[in-house]
Image (spheres, rainbow, N blue to C red):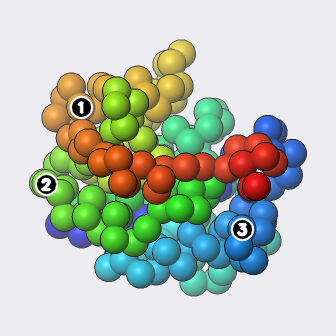
Amino acid sequence: MNLSAVLLAGGESRRMGENKATLLFHGEPLWQRQLELLRKLPLVEILVSARTDPAWRPVDVDLVLDAPPWHGPLSGLAAALARIRSSHLLALAIDMPFMTADYLQSLGKQIRFGCGVVPKIGHRAEPLAAIYPVEAMLDVRNGLGGSDFSLQSLVQRLIGNGKLRPILVSRAEETCFANLNEPTDLA
């Protein structure tokens, strides 16, 4: 089994009021921080998913345009799963600056043939720092064609059909999943 990664950067950042990808966090733009994190992992490829080609995208990182109709990260997942050259896709949100390479590597060690992993904090899945098998592509595309675009619903379907396995997040690991949605989150 091998692993590709997609940095999900197609959001509109309405609550933040500006593009999250270019926000400075501890002196560096979020896009740079997240790509550096992904480059620490043994990956087949790194993709950036967005609605349009971001000016900040490095030339050695391939672009995957979000699959229309645009329904948030579900569109990015659909486009990336259709494009990868590996058995599994690590999805990472651009706005999770506390995620660590060690945690992502630990997730990678838990994947199985045809089955990925999704972290769970309590009863809530963390689908934007999860690993999806390529076999989930049809389920994700079907999600785009329906009326429920919730990643929580998708994750429950994928767990139900054996394509994702939930991994409980320890108390110490919960900080990895903090994300930046509003200007006050930067404080």
Question: The C terminus is located in which quarter?
Answer: bottom right
Residue 109: image quadrant is: bottom left
Q: CA distance from mark 3 to mark 1?
A: 34 Å
As drawn, 149 above or below 10:
above
Mark number, residue 159: 1
Evaluate whether residue 65 shows in this view.
Answer: no
Instruction: Please give the name of the residue rendered at 43% of the width and 68% of the height, measured from the top-left corner.
Output: 100
Instruction: Please give the name of the residue rendered at 60% of the width and 49% of the height, measured from the top-left corner.
Output: 179
Q: Amino acid at mark 2?
A: Arg
The outermost residue toward the left is 113
Q: Earlier in the sequence, mark 2 or mark 1?
A: 2
**Which one is in front in this view, the residue at disc 2 or the one at disc 3?**
3
Left or right, 48 with reference to 139: right
Q: Amino acid at mark 3?
A: Phe
Q: Earlier in the sequence, mark 3 or mark 1?
A: 3
Residue that badge 3 annotates: 25
Q: Residue 185, how many percent across, how many down? A: 72, 48
Question: The N terminus is located in which quarter?
Answer: bottom left
Which of these two is toward me, 11 or 85?
11
Mark number, residue 112: 2
Q: CA distance from mark 2 to mark 3?
A: 34 Å
Left or right, 107 with reference to 182: left
